[in-house]
Amino acid sequence: MGFKPDLTRRDVTPKAMFLNRRQIMAGAAGLSLTGLIGRQARAQDALEPNSMEEIAGYNNFYEFGTGKEDPAKYAHMLTTSPWSIEVGGMVDKPGNYSLDDILSGVDIEERIYRFRCVEAWSMVIPWNGFELNQLLDQVGVQSRAKYVAFETAYRPDEMPGVRFPVVEWPYVEGLRLDEAMHPLTIMATGIYGETIPNQNGAPIRLVVPWKYGFKSIKSIVKITLTDQEPPTTWNKANPREYGFYSNVNPNVDHPRWSQATERVIGGGIFAARKETQMFNGYEEQVASLYDGMDLSENF
Amino acid sequence: MNPVSQRINEGVRKVPTWLLYVLAVIPPALLFYNGVVGNLGIDPVKKMEHQIGLYGLWALIATLSVTPLRRFARINLLKFRRALGLIAFFYISCHLAVWLFLDVQIWSQIWADIVKRPYITIGMGAFVLMIPLAVTSNNWSMRRLRKNWGKLHKLVYPAVLLGGIHFIMLRKGIQLEPLIYLGVIVLLLLLRLPPISKVRSPARA
Ligand code: HEM
């Protein structure tokens, strides 16, 4: 419990955190975006991250077992280097990109995000990563593409949990292209300035802070641009309970867990629940993505 | 009778029933203590809720094992059966209390959860079925209810079945552990079906 982060949000200025080259070059056109970014940074200042012990000791990563402590126990078996991602589908430059290639073309920054699990618990995690849009720009998304599909590594030799068909392996997820391009959507490679622990999705994972945690797919080996809504693992397992969008929404009831409130991890046994915020507190930034959509239909 | 069963039965005779009640209080007390001092890991409320739910399930399964053990293995634990059932009820009450006071806490949400979340509805169903059993687990009720007492206490079968189903439903995806528990429960119930239970019952214990 006594873990002290060696890098906190105070070590990073909000500007450096959020301005990247393209936004500066966008100049005047980027002004409104900069305003939005300022608000994000302020919201972020109020967040107190969980300890590394909590973040790396309490995970859902069923490839390593269904217990919350299983990933911390077994994920060391996963070989994370060398690592490459097969990028394909409707892109100009398909191919097998090594992690080093990908990382040489992006800006890594710290993002302190709320993390809300569909099981109604939450944490605050200081990720290190880059905006997914940087990677998508590198590979050249074709105009027909509307969705991005992701796939987790499937390695029976290294993943004791895949022996049993808890869900259909490999784990797959997807985003609409505009969600994937959104500046809040990142690919994380670190936590607290350290290499991301295997149980948190090493060496590279998605983080979409306004969606339930299972959308933020881990240990990604494949990214495909498509014009069809891609299948997603939990939706395939139980379409009534898990929709494609799975935006954090306290007003849309889930058959298993009330989503109106959440248990904040780290509060001890007498801690009170907290009210869950619309889009996990990122409503200002992302609500416009869903203008005109019925969110109880598209849950 | 084989020597092992005989040895067990002799041992059982020496153990007073009250000892079982006393021992049964220790696991939940320890769990609560460890929760308060912070020994239950990163999500202590879930840990308590799950562990006490498992204790309840174990106690129910133990209760259901008494009759088959006597019939098929000649092990006689009958004198503990009432205690085991009451201990199961005690554990499930603690499980419910953890859910009410430490997990959900919010009264409006509690009622909504009971009616809207099928796994909670089913768990609650199991608990409600156990209430009349706990209330009538005393000699006075046995005398008053006579034959009906036996009939009433058959409610333990649907209760434990609902408990097992509750466990399967609350786990995401298809998971092995709750399936094994349900398998054990179904087996214990099947052993009570007349064609099976008749097999050995004419023989004397
Ligand atoms: C005979 C009755 C019951 C039995 C045998 C039972 C058993 C269990 C077991 C074995 C677990 C999971 C342990 C694990 O995952 O390791 C569990 C979890 C749980 N039970 Fe029960 N239970 C019963 C009744 C109830 C009742 C009455 C409620 C509340 C109204 C309840 C609410 C819960 C909750 C909320 C969980 C945790 C779900 C989660 O992981 O979020 N149960 N129960």
Image (spheres, rainbow, N blue to C red):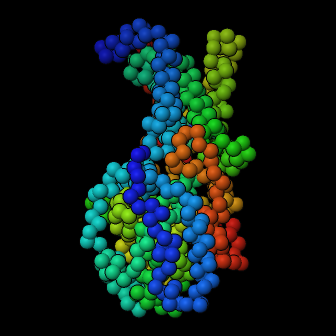
Is residue A58 something that shows in the picture? no
Q: Is residue B158 left or right of residue A159?
A: right
Ligand 1 occupies quarter: top right
Is residue B20 something that shows in the picture? yes
Label tally: 0
Q: Is residue A246 left or right of residue A140?
A: right
- In this rendering, the answer to whether B27 lies above or below A280 is above
Q: Please state which of residues A39 and B204 is positioned toward the viewer in this rendering.
A: A39
Q: Where in the figure is residue B122, as x and y percent of width and height?
A: 63, 42
- In this rendering, the answer to whether A166 lies above or below B27 is below
Q: Where in the figure is residue A9, as x and y percent of width and height?
A: 48, 63
Residue found at x 40% / y 87%: A139
Residue extending furthest toward the right: B108
Residue found at x 62% / y 34%: B97
Residue found at x 36% / y 73%: A221
Quadrant where the image shows the C terminus of chain A: bottom right
Q: Where in the figure is residue B2, as x and y percent of width and height?
A: 31, 15
Q: Is residue A16 left or right of residue A293?
A: left
Quarter of the image where one finds residue B103: top right
Residue extending furthest toward the top: B14
Quadrant where the image shows the N terminus of chain A: top left
Q: Where in the figure is residue A83, as x and y percent of width and height?
A: 29, 72
Residue found at x 55% / y 39%: A269
Q: Please state which of residues A178 and B20 is positioned toward the viewer in this rendering.
A: A178
Q: Please state which of residues A251 and B69 is positioned toward the viewer in this rendering.
A: A251
